[in-house]
Amino acid sequence: MLLRAIDNFFKHEAAGGILLMLSAAAALMVANSSLSQGYDSVLGSILSVTFNGEGLSKPLVLWINDGLMAVFFFLIGLELKRELLEGKLKNPSDVVLPGMAAVGGMAVPALIYAALNWGTPTLDGWAIPAATDIAFALGILALVGRRAPTSLKVFLLTLAILDDLGAIIVIALFYTAELKLDYLYLATLPLAGLIWLNMRGAHRVAPALLLGVIMWVFVLKSGVHATLAGVITAFCIPIKDKWGKSPLHALEHGLSPYVLYLIIPIFAFANAGVVLSGLTLPDLLSPVPLGVAAGLIVGKQIGVFGVTFVMVKAGLARMPSGAGWLHIYGVACLAGVGFTMSLFIGSLSFGDPALMNQVRLGVLCGSIVSGLMGYGALMLASRNTAQIATRTVG
């Protein structure tokens, strides 16, 4: 009975989002309990992989953020390549509306954060509220169930995918440390091997994954953020091999459960531990948490809903089939659930634990409010649609 219940849970579309929420709640409880010292100690433990004194030596939290998250970005890269070649991003006309909504949903939150942090060192965190968490947003939409139009899920998924693509570009351009060109040159060697395997339509993915790990080490040592190696490796996995099978589909299908149910929850547990002790209302209203929360709540709604409204009213795009403006507003709210990506960009922006605690506070507040508003708006929109349908039939 218990095994069947667990199996049914993991088959539900909302399972990933729920597990993410539980991991964040667990981190919050541990960080504010007698276990907090042990929590910090474990995450700060140094793990080293060296050979003759050369190699990598990092705290556990950075192994999670640089290593496990590279696997997360690898999966995003696989999804992006598939969508570009076969899916929702293949036809430019289908991408125009969610694409422009994604641009607005990144630009406005960044501007709001920048306005509240202008002239201070914390301006570096401008990209934190620009991100959307796919697992969380789709998980909340899944809780609405069939009452939401199918087109709405496609709209949100396309918006979130393009948002992730934007986040990858932002990380590459603005969150690169001091470049070490010798390691960057070395990274081109495994990259050349990956390109060759892709051009050959290689069926076996093990050689590509090995080359990807080697490239990840070189990219990490170069100063460019190593998660980008995951995206590049993914784009070098063949969509079709020489026998007509799809290594990319097989790898994406096999990897998804491990990322969704293991890697992302581990990341959430390691990064969502906001220390609430001593926090007051003025702390919440300080520039960093206020900028992050306002960006996620207000900025995403203005950016996503505003751009969509202008595009549709100007005749430049069509509304998702069966969706009303309240549905679009609900999706705009869900885009403000920035959790995983926002915390990740926060970890790249600030090394100061005190500032990172403020980031966590802003991300949690912004994401929770956005999620609740989005769920409420979608439930209300679905109820209104059902009432109209009943009156029409009557």
Image (tube, helix red, strand yellow):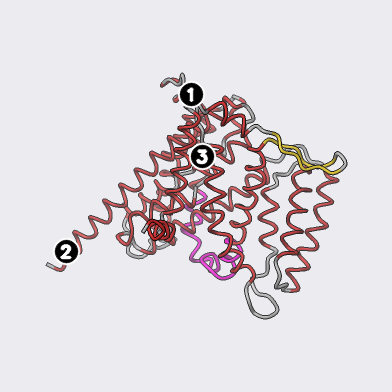
Give left or right: position of 340 versus 321. right
Say which mark, if any, is on residue 232: none
Q: For the point 22% across and 60% down, which residue is it? A: 386
Quick one: label 3 or label 2, which is nearer the N terminus? Answer: 3
Disc 3 to disc 2, C-alpha distance:
40 Å
Mark earlier in primary sequence (1, 3): 3
**Which quadrant of the view contains residue 170?**
top right
Query: In which quadrant of the rendered image does the C terminus lie?
Result: bottom left
Is residue 221 magenta-colored? Answer: no
Q: Which residue is mark 1?
A: 286
Q: Which residues are magenta?
A: 79-103
Q: How many marks?
A: 3
Residue 313 in view: no
Q: Which residue is mark 2?
A: 390
Taking the image as shown, residue 96 lies to the left or right of residue 349, namely left
Nearer to me, 10 or 248:
10
Q: Amino acid at mark 1?
A: Ser
Q: Is residue 65 above or below residue 287?
A: below
Looking at the rendered structure, the secondary structure element under dot 1 is loop
Q: Residues within 10 Å of mark 1 (few under 14, many from 20)?
A: some
| Amino acid bearing label 3 | Pro
Q: Residue at x 41, y 56 (%)?
A: 6
Q: Is residue 117 visible?
A: yes
The three-letter amino acid code for the residue at tag 2 is: Thr
Would you call the spot at circle 3 few (<14 residues within 10 Å), some (14-19), or many (20 or more)?
A: many
Nearest to N terminus: mark 2 or mark 1: 1
Q: Is residue 173 above or below residue 258?
A: above
Q: Tell which of 86 and 208 is nearer to you.
A: 208
